[in-house]
Amino acid sequence: MVNVAVDAMGGDNAPAEIVKGAVQAVNENENVKIFLTGRKDDIEKELAAYDHPSDRVKIVEASEIIEMGEPPVMAIRKKRDSSIVVALNLVKDKKCDAFVSAGSTGAVLAGGQLLIGRIRGVERPPLAPLIPTLEGVALLVDCGANVDARPTHLVQFAKMGSAYMKYAMGVNVPRVALLNIGTEEEKGNALVKETYPLLKACTDINFVGSIEARDIPQGGADVIVCDAFAGNVALKMYEGVAKVLLSKIKEVMMSSTKTKIGAMLIKDRLKECLKEFDATQYGGAPLLGLKGLVVKTHGSAKAVEVKNSVIQCITFKEQDVNGKIKQYLDL
């Protein structure tokens, strides 16, 4: 049984969508147990709307909520009875294997490091979301945890990302690429130029060189390594363009009787195609390199993303990804 602590009060759609996603996860997977942290009355009200195995959905009372605008470290230290802190302590105390939250990213990142702690030898834990490509998915590491990174950090990101893609996603020999403004070895800023030869010298990863942002959607690599500033810009542009394209496709299809008929004819196939590029089906972004698994979902996460984030935790636990990360880092 994989025990997952879920922050029921975090995110724009809490607690309704969070509870709904948690229930979907336990109803679809017999080997997971959910611990919903937050205000008991609010959670019970939402749970009452669904059929679920009561022995695998537990409520852990937490009276406080960390709001999005609060200073992360201060909030973690002062709001000890918040849904985030209570859930993180369940992982810290080994009562749960993983933690999922759509709440404050800063608080989740700070709390993960302060309460759960890093694997010994890990310099900086990166936030690593899966993003859809023509070849399947790629891991973008880092996308939000370390804005100012050093070359040695990026080397560890590459190794942790390789371990995740191999053991959690089943990519036998993950291709690792360094996000850059060109593919030539001499291009890039100081960080990229210093990191490139270090990655090139690594014998335990499959480094394929630099990759430009436009080649990521084509599936040019399985692990995209970068600092959090570049990664977050790339990720947000990725998501923004996807929304605009979807909006324009809908607009064109509904523009006339002829296009509406055409839309009806291709509707099923189009849905299948668009689903492949729906990032929510891959779950949230794990914070790699911690002693326990921490997964951050979008603040706007709906039930399906919460459910898939929980399923992601099951795979992480069953494949012992943390143990594999230690092996990759030779710790």
Image (tube, rainbow, N blue to C red):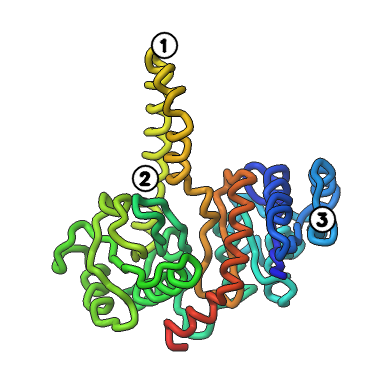
Does any portion of residue 44 appear in the rendered image? yes
The quarter of the picture where residue 108 lies is bottom right
- What is the C-alpha distance between the residues marked 2 and 3? 40 Å
Q: How crowded is the residue under tag 1: few (<14 C-alpha within 10 Å), some, or many (20+)?
A: few
In this rendered view, identify the residue nearer to me: 158 or 168: 168
Percent x, y for residue 301?
A: 59, 46
Determine whether 14 is above or below 202 in the image.
above
Percent x, y for residue 140?
A: 40, 60
Q: How crowded is the residue under tag 2: few (<14 C-alpha within 10 Å), some, or many (20+)?
A: few
Determine whether 281 is above or below 99 in the image.
above
Q: Residue at x 25, y 68 (%)?
A: 192
Percent x, y for residue 81?
A: 77, 62
Q: Do the residues labelled 2 and 3 touch (CB within 8 Å)?
A: no
The quarter of the picture where residue 2 lies is bottom right
Q: Is mark 1 on a helix, strand or loop?
A: helix
- What is the C-alpha distance between the residues marked 3 and 1? 48 Å
- What is the C-alpha distance between the residues marked 2 and 1? 33 Å
Quarter of the image for the N terminus: give it: bottom right
Q: Which amino acid does label 3 sit on?
A: Pro
Q: What residue type is labelled 2?
A: Met
What label sits on residue 257 in the rendered view? 1
Q: Which amino acid does label 1 sit on?
A: Thr
Residue on which the image places disc 2? 237
Residue on which the image places disc 3? 53
Q: Is mark 2 on a helix, strand or loop?
A: helix
Q: Which residue lies furthest to the top in this view?
A: 257
